Amino acid sequence: MADNQPDYNAAEAATILLKDYRERRQPFHGLDDYDKAMTHMRNTASAKIEKLDEPLKTIATRLFSTTDKGFFLFQVCEWKLDYLAEALIHAIDAKNPLALAINTRALVEHLAALVAIAEELEQLESSLRGQGQEKDINDALRKAEKFIHRGFYGKSPKLTNDKNEQALHVNDCLKALKKEVVDIEEVYDFLCEYAHPNHGSNILVSTGQLGSGRLNPPEEFHRETLECLRRYCSLSMLFLRKRGIQHASVFIRLQDLLELCFRRGAKVTNVFSIKAPKPEGDGKSRDTAFFFLKARTDMEAIKLGYEFLEKEGYKVEKRENGGVTDGFIYDVYTTDKGTIWFKVPRMKL
């Protein structure tokens, strides 16, 4: 983990970032009564799904259920991270080295689980886009369904031999996080050394020599280790602040796939088809802005815009809002090939 802390000592920086995470979680308290919060969305989706014919009806039902349950599990992870952040603030304030070590390790474990869940759902989205074979669509949904089930109901391998009933292993979760944090395994090994009841945790409450020295020594005896633990708290919070929203966006993309099921003419063979990024207009002005007339959803129009920029080799230097008119948003891009305009439907939340 790279260290990009502001000019605070490690304890101050960790406390600030832990409190910041908890403050940013406040709006999500509206999801505490999850069934109540999701009633409108569930009723709306159910009404639309009921109008579909088989086999698209079953596929849409499973896709919505997987997205709904995946989002619930994601929020469960966020709540556990919230509680761990609270515990770590107390550990830092109380100068409790063992609580700091144990909860920092738990923080990294739950952060890894959060990333693993997002990765699995991103794989589902990737597997569905462009897929027109019913068997392959159902196989992709089945894989995600099993993962989500394990993520919530999973038990210790000592309690069940059924792989589908076993909890997600922390090492598998760490592999998902390793794709973004290359040294996470080394970080985790360090944290385990001080969280387990071995010499590592022993020296947090002694001067490290069996039968001599001091018990419960002041911080200066192990300042370097304690500072490192606090920095890992900070870096975990920075990761969530920078990457958490990006990972959570998978639920918007899955919802967009569900919306494709409700479009006229949708059937299993074409519902997840990928449109070519061929816009109308020339992009030179607001009046002739690039526009994807055949985009089936708002999100698809935005996605096609990004694909068009990449395909045509534009190097974007800056993006600005060009205004909102008649249900459309105008995006203005400053590129290496000049200024270009896009018109996209305003997303309906």
Image: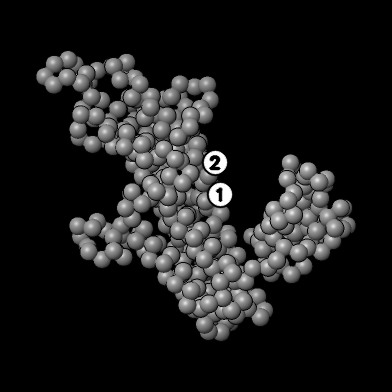
* Mark 1, secondary structure of its residue: helix
* Amino acid type of the residue tagged 2 in the rendering: Lys
Q: Is residue 47 above or below residue 127?
A: below
* Left or right of residue 33: residue 302: right
Of residue 273 and residue 297, the one placed in the foreground of this image is 273
Q: Residue at x 36, y 40 (%)?
A: 185
**Where does label 2 land, which residue?**
242
Count of labels in the image:
2
Rendered location of residue 284, percent (x, y): 86, 53
* Amino acid type of the residue tagged 1 in the rendering: Gln
Q: Residue at x 77, y 67 (%)?
A: 293
Asked whether the viewer can see residue 302, the reply is no
Q: Give the quarter of the figure containing the N terminus.
A: top left
Q: Which mark is residue 76?
A: none
Rendered location of residue 4, percent (x, y): 52, 29
**Where does label 1 land, which residue?**
246
Q: Residue at x 47, y 77 (%)?
A: 135
Rendered location of residue 151, percent (x, y): 36, 58
* Mark 2, secondary structure of its residue: helix
Asked whether the viewer can see residue 252, the reply is yes
Q: Local crowd at mark 2 within 10 Å, few (<14), some, or many (≥20)?
A: few
| Marks 1 and 2, how far apart at CA | 8 Å
Outermost residue, left direction?
211
For the residues labelled 1 and 2, say whether their Cβ atoms are less than 8 Å apart. yes
Q: Local crowd at mark 1 within 10 Å, few (<14), some, or many (≥20)?
A: few
Q: Is residue 81 above or below residue 309?
A: above
Rendered location of residue 12, percent (x, y): 45, 24
